[in-house]
């Protein structure tokens, strides 16, 4: 452990920190001390998570010690009891995107001396419920309702066991390993002791100093209330925050259709009818049965789930809302969208509609509570999981709409627009028009179906029959209200309104940082674009404009790729150009390669072209790539990802190498760690810009242009569009260097990369960026790069086929016998001579020296000799390789068309099975997949030891 003093805070680090880690921790402590917000970009592999934890927890410990000293001084002059220490300490909320990422945070925390900090992970019943029946329910809403019902009836034994176990016992049970448990550990421990992990986590949250949770639990005001998150005076950390802007906007966006409202009306009617029946049944039972003393009073005190009068009022409001929603279609103020069926209105148009229907701000909380009570009642009365679904949707819709219209949102917007402080919150008035500027209402009138056949002919039939159906039955159409937020600052500033002390936003890919900080809307007191722990010579990055063989231009824009009669040639050239680049890299890059495409459509389209176009008369580009490396493709189904990831790892570990075809913004580009051999090269095909034909993207650009017309400092819609694409690219590039000793190459396969400003790339790679007019130049640099790293690749596919089909099959199946061993060895000898063009009867196992590139820096080259000391080799030769009488081998015949040695006499030798084992193991290890390599800095391994372990006889 290393002790580092940063701003008078003693930070205990597991090892001596790098300079970039010290710089990072300095910014963290400065922001907390000064109570301002900070945005920190630090590349993957710089120990960002560890630095965050150690810096914040070291500061927290110092604060704890200072408060304890103050308490001790105060106790000398006062006889009263002191308040709890925790009430004076800020709570730290550490947020990441998923629970799997939080599990990695827990592992990092357990490496430190700060693991005695009171810590908990917040999760929902989806992750934590272990009840045999409830945990199998897929619908989160129904699962919550079932859990609440069982808890109220005391019928869940897991909850009952938790409730009756003391806190000291629970602490002992859940910390029995001495480490902080992550979400999976909580489930395992809960199952072992039959104690509910959900309520245990909720209990721990009350006193926790460090709370780990997904960041939508913090940003979403509805989830924040559900999970009892108290932000006042807290420190909030958003790790992996490169997607924060989109997430903040999604949280504040919601949509509902006229069909949902109509079904909600039906559910309220059913609830009223069911409640009336319950009341009648209760009265009948009370009339016929004399209750025991005190029972009647308690039953009456319990009361109904909701009042019938309140439900009747709600029903009338929903009827009125249904009418007002249909009236929006006749509103002439709506703006038609080119290429889209709907109309766009300012955000305050929805607020006006709700006000006109009787849904006012002062009634919103009461209406949401009533909707929640009726929903719970309907779910308990019906076994169907669909009942109450639309009421719950209606409640969520109203909650989001009136959260955007709340005092909290109004203050946040006022702060962003006028610079008002949180202390002036009471003076800020709720102005629907001001709030509405940050939203758009998109109204579409259709059949509610977003899925249509992709085939042109079937799509025509689909649309034709849809037209006939709608013509004869217009009731099939519905009006959908899409209330979309286009300003992430509302959600982020709402955190400050709730009293957050410091917000720390960090990721490996925030670039361009100035754009990110402006869009988030916080007044950042500091920012950091950190350097990488790795050196500049550990990565090369090429912006490649054309393919290496046929020099085809690489431009993956939609206009260039769009299939039409006059663009078929361009499409073919583009596909062949990308195939040439990938093939050349596959033959030059050792071990693992990651190839990211801008979209699934582009990936599948190019793969089909790789299989269609031939590289040689007999083989397609796909076949040639597959000969060099195993190919795996990222699946759309998340459940298949682990299987595909395992196949990729096996391909890399086998020595042959593997290529992972994946997409930007996918799980592979953001959620999986590839290091060392798994990622020697990262290629990006195209630029993953947001889809222009997405209505929400178009409305986002419209919103930015409207804002820029009023505020000249606002970025243009084009800058936003470019930054969105490059942020996804940068996330993919982060896969190449994962720690300070890692190395690899980056290939950006599109000529458009050469024209972009360097500020769109992360700082750690800017100095390595280089434009290559031809892919040939980049391939040459790539080969030299790995040669200098002593990680060279030799490809001998013909040799690989001979040994893999001949040697391995004969040895494994043991179909040879002692009488034909000499003949088999003769064939083996001829095969090697054929491929290597090299005759060495006594040194048959030594590769041709001409095939081995020796460098001045590398003492050992990629040959069998490089794996063994000379003494061991000589010992092996004398033990395993019998001397061959060279007189039986004639010189090559001058009249023959071949240079193979002609055997004129029968080979007479005694050969043991260990001899063939020696050859089969050697060639299987070195050549069976056509690749071999070694690294000088790695520990040398004796080949003889490897052979002894692999001999099967």
Image (cartoon, grey):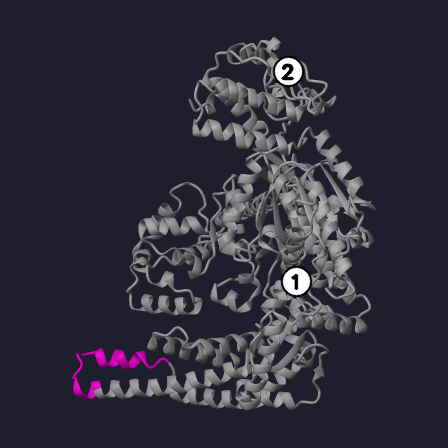
Discs 2/1, front = 2
Find disc 1 in the rendering and name its residue: 245
- Total numbered labels placed on residues in the image: 2
Give the image location of residue 715, x and y in percent: 78, 64
When the figure is inspected, residue 336 is found, relative to residue 771, above or below; the finding is: below
Quadrant into which the N terminus falls: top right
Give the image location of residue 874, x and y in percent: 58, 11
Residue situated furthest front in the rendering: 895
Q: Residue at x 54, y 87 (%)?
A: 321
Is residue 201 toward the left or the right of residue 298 in the image? right
When the figure is inspected, residue 809 is found, relative to residue 844, above or below; the finding is: below
Give the image location of residue 611, x and y in percent: 64, 51
The residue closer to the viewer here, 59 or 740, is 740
Quadrant into which the C terminus falls: top left
Mark yes or no: residue 858 visible.
Answer: yes
Q: Which mark is residue 938?
A: none
The residue closer to the viewer here, 495 or 315, is 315
Over which residues does the magenta segment extend?
285-305
Q: Residue at x 34, y 77 (%)?
A: 382
Q: Pick whichever of labels 2 and 1 is earlier in the sequence.
A: 1
Give the image location of residue 7, x and y in percent: 67, 43
Find disc 2 in the rendering and name its residue: 840
């Amino acid at each position: 452990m290393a002790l580092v003093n940063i701003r008078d805070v003693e930070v205990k680090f597991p090892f001596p920190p790098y300079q970039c880690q010290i710089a990072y921790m300095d910014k963290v402590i400065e922001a907390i001390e000064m109570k301002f917000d900070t945005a920190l970009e630090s590349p993957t592999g710089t120990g960002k998570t560890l630095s965050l934890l150690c810096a914040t927890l070291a500061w927290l410990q110092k604060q704890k010690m200072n408060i304890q000293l103050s308490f001790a001084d105060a106790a000398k002059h006062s006889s009263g009891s002191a308040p709890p220490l925790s009430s004076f300490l800020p709570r730290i909320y550490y947020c990441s995107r998923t629970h799997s990422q939080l599990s990695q945070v827990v592992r990092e925390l357990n490496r430190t001396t700060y693991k005695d900090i009171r810590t908990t992970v917040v999760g929902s019943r989806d992750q934590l419920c272990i009840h045999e029946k409830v945990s199998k329910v897929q619908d989160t809403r129904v699962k919550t309702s079932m859990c609440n019902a069982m808890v109220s009836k005391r019928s869940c034994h897991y909850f009952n066991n938790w409730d009756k176990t003391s806190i000291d016992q629970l602490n002992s049970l859940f910390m029995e390993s001495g480490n902080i448990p992550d979400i999976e550990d909580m489930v395992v421990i809960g199952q072992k002791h039959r104690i509910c992990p959900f309520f245990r986590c909720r209990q721990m949250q009350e006193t926790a100093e460090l709370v780990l949770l997904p960041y939508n639990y913090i940003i979403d005001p509805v989830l924040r209330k559900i999970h009892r998150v108290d932000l006042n005076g807290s420190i909030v950390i958003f790790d992996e925050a490169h997607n924060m802007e989109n997430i903040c906007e999604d949280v504040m966006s919601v949509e509902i259709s006229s069909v949902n409202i109509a079904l909600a009306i039906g559910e309220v009617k059913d609830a009223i009818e069911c409640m009336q029946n319950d009341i009648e049944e209760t009265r009948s039972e009370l009339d016929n049965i004399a209750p025991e003393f005190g029972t009647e009073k308690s039953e009456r005190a319990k009361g109904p789930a909701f009042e019938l009068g309140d439900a009747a009022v709600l029903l009338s409001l929903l009827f009125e809302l249904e009418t007002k929603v249909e009236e929006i279609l006749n509103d002439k103020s709506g703006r038609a969208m080119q290429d889209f069926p709907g109309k766009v209105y300012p955000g305050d148009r929805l607020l006006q509609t709700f006000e006109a229907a009787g849904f006012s701000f002062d009634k919103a909380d009461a209406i949401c509570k009533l909707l929640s009570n009726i929903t719970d009642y309907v779910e308990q009365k019906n076994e169907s999981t669909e009942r109450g679904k639309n009421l719950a949707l209606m409640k969520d819709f109203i909650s989001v709409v009136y959260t955007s219209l709340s005092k909290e949102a109004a203050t946040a917007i006022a702060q962003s627009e006028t610079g008002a402080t949180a202390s002036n919150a009471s003076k800020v008035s709720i102005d629907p028009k001001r709030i509405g500027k940050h939203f758009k209402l998109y109204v579409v009138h259709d059949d509610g179906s977003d899925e249509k056949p992709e085939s042109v002919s079937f799509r025509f039939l689909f649309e034709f029959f849809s037209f006939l159906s709608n013509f004869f039955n217009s009731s099939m159409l519905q009006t959908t209200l899409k209330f979309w937020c286009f300003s992430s600052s509302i959600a982020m500033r709402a955190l400050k309104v709730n009293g957050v002390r410091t917000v720390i936003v960090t990721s490996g890919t925030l670039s361009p940082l100035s754009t990110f900080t402006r869009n988030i809307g916080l007044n950042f007191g500091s920012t950091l674009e950190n350097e990488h722990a790795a050196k500049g010579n550990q990565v090369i990055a090429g912006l490649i404009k054309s393919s290496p063989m046929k020099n085809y231009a690489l431009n993956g824009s939609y206009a260039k790729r769009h299939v039409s009669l006059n663009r078929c040639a361009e499409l073919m050239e583009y596909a062949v150009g990308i195939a040439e680049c990938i093939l050349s890299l596959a033959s030059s890059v050792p071990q693992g390669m990651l190839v990211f495409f801008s979209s699934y459509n582009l990936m599948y389209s190019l793969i089909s072209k790789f299989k269609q176009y031939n590289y040689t008369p007999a083989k397609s580009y796909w076949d040639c790539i597959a000969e060099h490396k195993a190919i795996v493709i990222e699946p759309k189904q998340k459940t298949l990802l682990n299987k595909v990831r395992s196949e990729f790892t096996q391909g890399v570990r086998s020595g042959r190498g593997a290529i992972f075809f994946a997409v930007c913004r996918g799980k592979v580009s953001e959620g999986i760690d590839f290091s060392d051999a798994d990622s020697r090269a990262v290629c990006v095909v195209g630029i993953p810009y947001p889809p222009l034909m997405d209505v929400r993207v178009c409305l986002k650009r419209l919103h930015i242009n409207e804002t820029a017309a009023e505020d000249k400092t606002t970025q243009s819609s084009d800058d936003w569009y470019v930054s969105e694409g490059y942020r996804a690219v940068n996330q993919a590039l982060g896969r190449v260097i994962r720690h300070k000793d890692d190395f690899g190459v980056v290939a950006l396969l599109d000529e458009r990369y050469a024209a972009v400003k360097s500020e769109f790339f992360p700082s750690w790679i800017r100095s390595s960026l280089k434009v290559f007019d031809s892919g040939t130049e980049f391939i040459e640099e790539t080969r030299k790069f790995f040669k200098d790293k002593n990680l060279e690749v030799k490809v001998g596919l013909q040799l690989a086929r001979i040994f893999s089909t001949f040697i391995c099959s004969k040895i494994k199946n043991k179909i040879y016998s002692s009488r034909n061993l000499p003949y088999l060895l003769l064939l083996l000898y001829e095969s090697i001579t054929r491929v290597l063009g090299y005759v060495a009867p006594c040194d048959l196992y030594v590769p041709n020296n001409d095939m081995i590139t020796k460098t001045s820096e590398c003492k050992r080259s990629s040959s069998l000799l490089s794996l063994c000391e000379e003494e061991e080799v000589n010992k092996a030769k004398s033990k395993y390789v019998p001397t061959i009488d060279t007189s039986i081998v004639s010189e090559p015949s001058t009249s023959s068309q071949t240079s193979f040695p002609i055997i004129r006499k029968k080979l007479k030798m005694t050969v043991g099975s260990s001899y063939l084992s020696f050859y089969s193991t050697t060639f299987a290890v070195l050549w069976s997949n056509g690749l071999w390599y070694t690294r000088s800095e790695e520990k040398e391994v004796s080949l003889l030891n490897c052979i002894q372990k692999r001999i099967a006889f």
